[in-house]
Image (cartoon, rainbow, N blue to C red):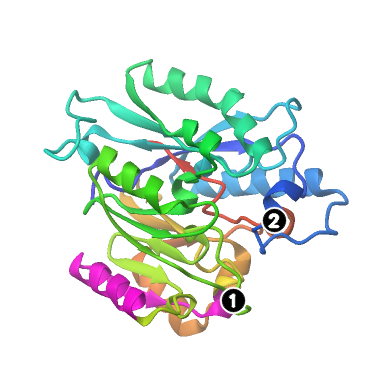
Amino acid sequence: MKGYFTNKVLMVRPVAFGYNSQTAENNKFQQNGFEEGAQQKALEEFDNYVKELREAGIEVLVVEDTPEPHTPDSIFPNNWFSTHSAEELSSDDTQDGADGKSTIVLYPMFAPNRREERGKNVMERLKEHYGNSYNLVDFTESEKEGAFLEGTGSLILDRENKIAYACISPRTDEDLLDEWADRLGYDYCSFEATDDDGTPIYHTNVMMCIGSRYAIVCLDAIENIEERMTLIEVVEESGKEIFEITLEQMESFAGNMLELQGKDAMGKSRPVLVMSKTAKESLDSEQLHLLQNYATIVAPDLDCIEKNGGGSARCMIAEIF
């Protein structure tokens, strides 16, 4: 699986974290009324998370947020950009990667104050990392047309098999998904999903995760049986085992996980699966045992970030390839 799971990530250290009313419109995971002391608590959770990732052998590029413009969700950078290696994209289906360069993709965001995140110093850090030698694919013009596709929040990527899984929602436009897939040479599996109350799920990454040998997914969220069976078929044909979670576990962020490539104490590579403490505690002993057979689990306490921001462990990580 070398090349398809990274040991390097970028995270944005918060400076003004808090409840974002602009994203709360369609993010049911956010909970209003927990703002008091949110910035300090979020900072403590963030720093501890970075520490645990580094102890697991993950290289973390930390970018300090700036007070202005005010962007309360900048702690979730994976929504507005993604990076892709030349190995991933080089094929007859796409021009990107054929020149041996990595690719950065910029995404259109639903909330106006989240669009401001692109103007901050994260891009400067990326340019520094890639030495200005990269391809840039920019979909942000579609914001003017009211069409959105929010990075690896909207897209769950099987990079090895070049399959994107996407839950269609106000933040994941199917026409834009089709354009993205054509541009990057991916196939995709799209579907509609709702929570226990019938509310559309805003981001695919709260209900699904693709690992090297498994796919964590809340199948009960997909009411359309045909769409559900199609997803199962696509996953199984890709050679991965379905690991099913319940709607209740999904609401505890058990779908919001990410596999990375860490190192053990001897420096040997090993898969690391990141999730929050909330997510881990929602799993039963059998589920936890099965996941520990796949990877070493890193599960920091992100309670404040989850309640205020409506995002969890995976949302805070932008993979660097």
Q: In this view, does 57 lie to the left or right of 88?
A: right
| Amino acid type indicated by mark 2 | Glu
Q: Reply above or below: 144 against 180.
A: above
State whether the magenta stretch is mostly helix, strand or loop.
Answer: helix
- Looking at the rendered structure, the secondary structure element under dot 1 is loop
- Residue drawn at (38%, 49%), measured in percent from left and top? 175
- Residue drawn at (32%, 78%), measured in percent from left and top? 226
Residue placed furthest toward the top: 132
Q: Quadrant of residue 195?
A: bottom right
* Residue span colored magenta: 226-249
Mark 1: few/some/many CA within 10 Å (<14, 14-19, 20+): few
Task: State which tag comes first along the sequence, 2 or 1.
Answer: 2
Mark 2: few/some/many CA within 10 Å (<14, 14-19, 20+): few
- Looking at the rendered structure, the secondary structure element under dot 2 is loop
Residue that carries the numbered disc 1 in the rendered image: 198
Residue that carries the numbered disc 2 in the rendered image: 25
Residue placed furthest toward the left: 92
- Residue drawn at (32%, 48%), measured in percent from left and top? 178
Q: Reply above or below: 264 against 61.
A: below
Q: In this view, does 108 lie to the left or right of 237?
A: right
Camera-side residue of 278 and 82: 82
- Residue drawn at (11%, 38%), measured in percent from left and top? 92
Q: Quadrant of residue 227?
A: bottom left
Q: Which of the numbered marks, if any, corresponds to residue 24?
A: none
**Between marks 2 and 1, how big is the CA–CA gap?**
15 Å
Residue 263 in view of the camera = no
Camera-side residue of 200 and 316: 200
Q: How many labels does the image show?
A: 2
Please check the rendered image and state whether residue 281 is part of the magenta-colored stretch, yes or no: no
Q: Reply above or below: 158 against 141.
A: below
